Image (cartoon, rainbow, N blue to C red):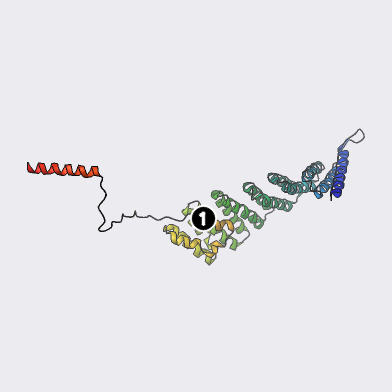
Amino acid sequence: MAAANAKKIEEAQEHIKNAEKCLKTTLLKWKADYDIAADAYNKAAACYKSTKSYQECKDCLLKAADCYKKNNSLFSAARCYDQAGLVCKELGQLEEIATFAERACIMYQQHGSPDAGALCLDRAAKMIETQFPERAVDLYKRGVDVVMIEDRPRQASEFCAKFSRLLVRLKMYDEAADAIRREISLNQQSENIPAIGRLVVALVLVQLAREDYVAAEKAFKEWGNNCEVEEIVAMETLLRGYDEEDAEVARKALHSPFIRHMDVEYAKLARDLKLPQGIVAPSKPQVRENAAPSYKSVADAAQQDDDDGESQQGGLC
C-alpha cells in the first residue's frame, strides 16, 4: 500500500512539473498553454486524492481552476471549485466549502448551466448546516435566486423550505416568518395547495413564537382556505386558546397528532411554545379553625402588660 501511494505521489509530482512547464513562456513561446496545464493539475489532484493527500489535492484543484478560467473554460473551472469544496470537507475546513460553492455557482451560471450551480449550492449547504447554519442559510437563499432566474418556483420553494427551517432552529423568528411567507408565495405560483396548508400552520406557530397573536390570526385568515380540515380544526382551537388565554385549550391543540408529525423544527417549536397565561386571582391565606394564638415575644408581652396597667390607673382616676 505504501509503495502504491509513493508511486501515485511521484506521478502527481510529474504532472505538476508538466503543468509548470506548460505555463512558462519563452522567446519562441509567447503564450502559456493554460488548457494543457489545467488538465495536468487535474490529473495531479486525482493522484493526490487517491493517496488521501487532501491538502495537495486541494491546491492542485485551485491551480487547475485558475488555468481553466484563463482559458475561458468556465464549466471545467466550476467543477474544480466544486471538487475543492468536497476536499475541504475531508480536511475539516467547512467554512471554505461555502466560498468554493459560490465561486462554482458563478462559473456554472456564466457557462449557462444554472442547474449545476443550484445543485452545487444545495450540496454545500447540507455539508455545513449543522456547524454553520447561518452560512447555509445564505447558500440556500442564493439557490432560490439561481433557480428563479429560470422561473422554477417549485424548485425555489424547496430551497426556501430548507432555510426557513434553519431560521426556526436559530430562533430568528422574524426572518423565519418572512421566509415562510415567501415560500407560500412560491407554492402559489406552482399551485401546490397542500404545501400551502402546511405552511400556514408553520407560519401561525412562528408568529405565536414571536408573541404576536394578531399576526398569527391574520395569517390564518389570509391563507386558511388552503388548509385541510385537520389543519383548520387544529389552528382554530389553538387560536381560540390564545384568544381566551386558556392554556389547556392551547396545549390540547399543540399536542394534536398533525402538529406533532410536522417537520422536526416546527414540531420542536410547537413543543416549546409559550402557552397563554390568563389572569389569576391572588389566593387568599387559609385560616385554620381553633388554631393556636400567634407567637408573641417576651418584650411584646411586657409592653402589653404595662399598657393594660396604665389604662386601669386612668380608669380609677
Q: Position of residue 124 (x, y in %)?
A: 69, 50
Q: Position of residue 291 (x, y in %)?
A: 26, 56
Taking the image as drawn, is residue 204 in sight?
no
| Relative horizontal placement of residue 126, taking residue 250 as reference (left or right) | right
| Relative horizontal placement of residue 70, taking residue 189 as reference (left or right) | right
Is 174 or 186 nearer to us in this picture?
174
Q: Residue at x 72, y 53 (%)?
A: 115
Identify residue for label 1. Answer: 272
* Label 1 residue SS: helix
Is 144 or 206 nearer to us in this picture?
206
Q: Position of residue 42 (x, y in %)?
A: 82, 46
Q: Residue furthest right?
A: 28
Q: Residue furthest left?
A: 317
Three-letter residue code for mark 1: Asp
Mark 1 nearby-residue class (10 Å; few <14, some 14–19, many ≥20):
few
| Relative horizontal placement of residue 229, taking residue 90 as reference (left or right) | left
When the figure is inspected, residue 28 is found, relative to residue 130, above or below; the finding is: above
